[in-house]
Image (spheres, rainbow, N blue to C red):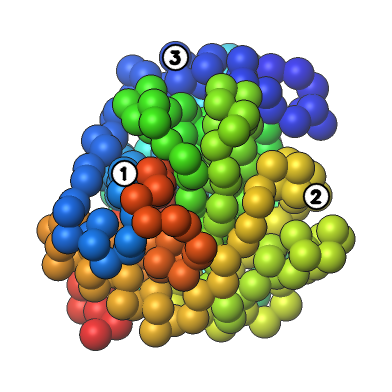
């Protein structure tokens, strides 16, 4: 890849696909007539909830870890995360045989904490604030010498995330649009790079919770709007975009559709019922956005189901 400040290009996504192939699953693309009827389109579901660690995040984490030089890899990796990035980085580090140091908030769910520790990572708990997380990961980085891997503001992560869309295009050559959820923007930015370099005419749309709509505001105003007080069931979509991800998204994304929590839960339930696939609320945001967006009947829409890590003891219905 280019320098760390360079945005990724299609060649980086293609290289990432080859690099992660020995580790990541090539997830299936599923279709459901019942879901199509509910959505009013022909939907192709890219099942990243069936990826290792249950989320697309494993792609970018693996790409970033495998790109480290031997000297940097020997230092180990670190990050702060309360969710899928922590698990993805922990497993990617284990795959390479190096240490992973994860900072997680003390109110993290027991299931997520156990998963990260189960992959062999060293976990440091901190107060559940961004200030505490950043301060703690800085201390861990200073103490261990580990290389910090940001969950989305990193061209290696973005390129890795884009490999899901690349696979989707390879399998479904007749798509009119591709839809993903948007949080920090790594998945959406990677999708933009992969899709428009390969097939410029495909529409790219994102779904975002209305209670965390900084990306929609940013796209509408052309200025990066920070996330301040997110309130949504989609706990994987609470972060602000970075200047890097927003720069890519602003250039390629046609529309960001906001959906409320009732719409997210309805979409999640329909996917569970019609397809028998367990997806998390953040993934359901993309499905809900398709139902709310203005797509002509019969439009071929690829939907990236970003993850499936659900607390089965606290289902929203």
**Which residue sits at x=29%, y=30%?**
25
Q: Which residue is mark 3?
A: 18
Q: Tag 3, which secondary structure?
A: helix
Say which mark, if any, is on residue 243.
2
Residue occupying the point 68% across, 38% down: 154
| Residue on which disc 1 sits | 44
Of all residues, the one furthest to the front in this rendering is 297
Return the x and y of residue 270 as percentages of the image width and height.
Answer: 23, 69
Q: Is residue 291 above or below residue 93?
A: below
Compare marks 1 and 3 and give the one earlier in the sequence.
3
Q: CA distance from mark 2 to mark 1?
A: 30 Å
Disc 1 is placed on an element classified as: strand
Checking the image for residue 225, the label placed there is none
**Gap in Å between the C-alphas at discs 1 and 3?**
23 Å
Instruction: Say which residue appears at 55% left-offset and 31% top-offset.
Output: 195
Q: CA distance from mark 2 to mark 3?
A: 28 Å
Instruction: Tell us which disc is closer to us: 1 or 3.
Output: 1
User: Residue at (24%, 35%) from the top-left corner?
Assistant: 28
């Amino acid at each position: 890849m280019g320098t760390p400040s360079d945005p990724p290009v299609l060649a980086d996504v293609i290289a990432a696909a080859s690099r992660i192939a020995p580790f990541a699953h090539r997830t299936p693309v599923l279709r459901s007539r019942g879901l199509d009827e509910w959505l009013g389109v022909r939907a192709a579901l890219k099942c990243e909830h069936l990826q290792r660690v249950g989320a697309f995040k494993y792609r970018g984490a693996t790409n970033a870890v495998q790109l480290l030089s031997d000297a940097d890899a020997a230092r180990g990796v670190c990050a702060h995360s309360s969710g899928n990035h922590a698990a993805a980085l922990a497993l990617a580090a284990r795959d390479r045989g190096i240490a992973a140091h994860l900072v997680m908030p003390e109110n993290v769910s027991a299931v997520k904490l156990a998963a990260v520790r189960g992959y062999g990572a060293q976990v440091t708990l901190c107060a559940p604030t961004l200030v505490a997380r950043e301060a703690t990961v800085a201390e861990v980085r200073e103490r261990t010498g580990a290389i910090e891997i940001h969950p989305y503001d990193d061209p290696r992560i973005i390129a890795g995330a884009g490999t899901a869309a690349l696979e989707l295009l390879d399998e479904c050559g007749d798509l009119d649009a591709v839809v993903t959820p948007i949080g920090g923007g790594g998945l959406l930015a990677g999708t933009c790079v992969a899709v428009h370099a390969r097939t410029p005419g495909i529409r790219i749309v994102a779904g975002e919770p209305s209670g965390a709509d900084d990306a929609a505001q940013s796209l509408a105003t052309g200025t990066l709007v920070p996330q301040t007080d997110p309130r949504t069931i989609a706990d994987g979509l609470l972060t602000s975009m970075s200047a890097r991800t927003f720069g890519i998204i602003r250039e390629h994304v046609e529309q960001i559709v906001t959906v409320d929590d009732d719409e997210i839960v309805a979409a999640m339930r329909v996917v569970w019922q019609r397809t028998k696939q367990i997806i998390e609320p953040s993934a359901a945001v993309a499905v809900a956005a398709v139902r709310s967006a203005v797509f002509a009947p019969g439009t071929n829409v690829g939907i990236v189901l970003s993850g499936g890590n659900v607390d089965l003891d606290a289902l929203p219905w």
